[in-house]
Image (tube, rainbow, N blue to C red):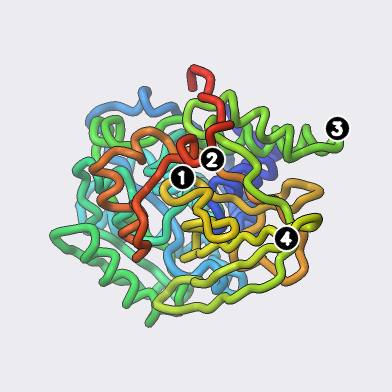
């Protein structure tokens, strides 16, 4: 995969959609990536299968409340320092950086890290979307340790965490993040190339870029939402998809609590009495129309502007916005019993079980068998 600085707009847009409301503001992430590339050059993007089995791979990401990142933009020094601190702890240099999640700003932070460190970036991630907690990644589900974990704030104060399980790492990191200003840069899940090949979700940078391009092309024809759906139907991960709802935001409850942006968004259909409610914890978790579930995690629930199909993050939602809501299937590796035990509905306190979007909607066609 070749990436140019001009591609960052489309990449950020596609990553914002896959972020399902979370992952941090992609615009801010894009500005950070552009600056890092201007200073250090564009990092090489390598495919997952091309990573040597014995290569050392680190992740790079922002942890905290996305709404705080808007006011406290990372400098880039904190991104680099988080990786350096992990290198110091392990006594080994990173050979590659991989995103922990493709959604939102956390698609861009790894570009910053790879550019500043002068090492390649892997075209893969740990979920094919965004999730709010550290343990909610395929790396953890299939056996990679989350720690050692290094976290750095804007003053370059740092903490290195070691635990015996990923949920404990999340709990310790979240407490420290609150004390460090609710937005920190982290590097964690150190692994070897063969472990990434077994546990990662391949091709997600490419997918985010192509999703952003599909939206941009759709704007030229005047129907970006339909253009997006047509493109998604060719995708092996997200191809079971549909526009779930269109309407206006009539109520919004949103708070920053426990290091998350938490709340509920209510939409009223423009030409009907139907009402949709979306519950979110950084990311959109469940969507219901007139009380009936129409999509639920780990499947993706994406809110976007009705006219432009520009994805809208949870911190950017506003009363009166006219939006469309798209539901998309998650990657198959995200729907296994092992995966659902880590990031299924019950992990967010939701009482209902996961039902795939194609079961909830009989009119969703099977995705075409397309090679990534």
Residue 122 or residue 259, whichever sits in front: 259
Please give the name of the residue rendered at 31% of the width and 41% of the height, measured from the top-left corner: 57
Circle 2 sits on which residue? 328
Camera-nearest label, 2 or 3: 2
Q: Is residue 359 visible?
A: yes
Are the residues tagged 3 and 1 within 8 Å (C-beta)?
no
Query: Left of 157 or right of it: where is 18?
Result: right
Q: Are marks 2 and 1 in contact (CB under 8 Å)?
A: yes
Up the image or down, 144 lies above or below 136; here it is above
The x, y position of residue 258, in whole percent, is 39, 77
Crowdedness near tag 2: few (<14), some (14–19) or many (≥20) residues, C-alpha within 10 Å: many
Q: Name the residue under label 4.
A: 273
Q: Which residue is drawn at 54% across and 30% down?
A: 239
Among numbered discs 4 and 2, the one appearing first in the sequence: 4
Quote the CA–CA distance across marks 1 and 4: 26 Å
* Mark pair 3, 4: CA separation: 30 Å
> Helix or strand or loop: what does disc 1 sit on?
loop
Nearer the camera: disc 1 or disc 4: 4
Whether residue 23 is visible here, answered yes or no, is no
Question: Which residue in the protein does label 1 denote?
Answer: 299
CA distance separating discs 2 and 1: 6 Å
Query: Mark 4 or mark 1, which is nearer the start of the sequence?
Result: 4
Q: Quadrant of residue 319?
A: bottom right
Q: Is residue 170 above or below residue 226?
A: below
Say which label, 3 or 4, has the lower sequence index.
Answer: 3
Q: Where is residue 243 in the image (x, y as percent from the top left)?
A: 65, 42
Disc on the earlier residue, 3 or 1? 3
Q: In which quarter of the image is the N terminus?
A: top right
Total numbered badges shown on the rendered structure: 4
The disc, 2 or 1, on the residue closer to the chain's N-terminal end is 1
Residue under the image location 54 percent in, 56 percent down: 287
């Amino acid at each position: 995969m070749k990436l140019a600085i001009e591609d960052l707009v489309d990449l950020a847009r596609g990553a914002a959609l896959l972020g399902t409301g979370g992952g941090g503001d992609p615009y801010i992430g894009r500005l950070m990536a552009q600056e890092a590339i201007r200073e250090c050059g564009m990092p090489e993007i390598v495919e997952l299968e091309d990573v040597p089995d014995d290569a050392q791979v680190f992740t790079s990401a922002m942890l905290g409340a996305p709404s705080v990142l808007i006011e406290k933009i990372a400098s880039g020094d904190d991104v680099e320092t988080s990786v350096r601190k992990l290198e110091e702890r392990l006594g080994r240099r990173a050979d590659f950086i991989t995103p922990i999640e493709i959604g939102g700003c956390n698609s861009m932070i790894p570009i910053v890290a790879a550019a500043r460190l002068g090492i390649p970036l892997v075209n893969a991630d740990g979920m094919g979307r965004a999730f709010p907690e550290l343990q909610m990644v395929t790396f953890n589900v299939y056996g990679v340790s989350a720690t050692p974990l290094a976290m750095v704030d804007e003053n370059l104060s740092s903490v290195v965490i070691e635990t015996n399980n990923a949920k404990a790492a999340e709990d310790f990191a979240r407490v420290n993040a609150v004390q460090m200003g609710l937005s920190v840069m982290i590097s964690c899940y150190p692994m070897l190339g063969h472990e990434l090949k077994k546990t990662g979700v391949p091709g997600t940078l490419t997918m985010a870029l192509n999703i952003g391009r599909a939206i941009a092309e759709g704007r030229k024809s005047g129907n970006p939402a339909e253009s997006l759906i047509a493109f998604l139907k060719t995708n092996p991960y997200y191809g079971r998809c549909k526009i779930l709802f269109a309407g206006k935001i009539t109520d919004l409850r949103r708070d920053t609590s426990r290091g998350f942006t938490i709340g509920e968004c209510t939409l009223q259909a423009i030409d009907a009495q139907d009402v949709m409610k979306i519950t979110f914890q950084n990311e959109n978790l469940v969507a219901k129309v007139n009380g009936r579930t129409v999509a639920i995690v780990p499947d993706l629930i994406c809110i976007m502007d009705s006219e432009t199909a520009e994805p809208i993050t949870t911190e950017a939602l506003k009363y009166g916005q006219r939006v469309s809501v798209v539901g998309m299937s998650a990657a198959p590796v995200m729907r296994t019993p092992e995966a659902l035990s880590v990031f299924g509905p019950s992990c967010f306190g939701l009482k209902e079980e996961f039902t795939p979007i194609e079961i909830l909607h009989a009119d969703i066609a099977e995705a075409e068998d397309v090679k990534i």
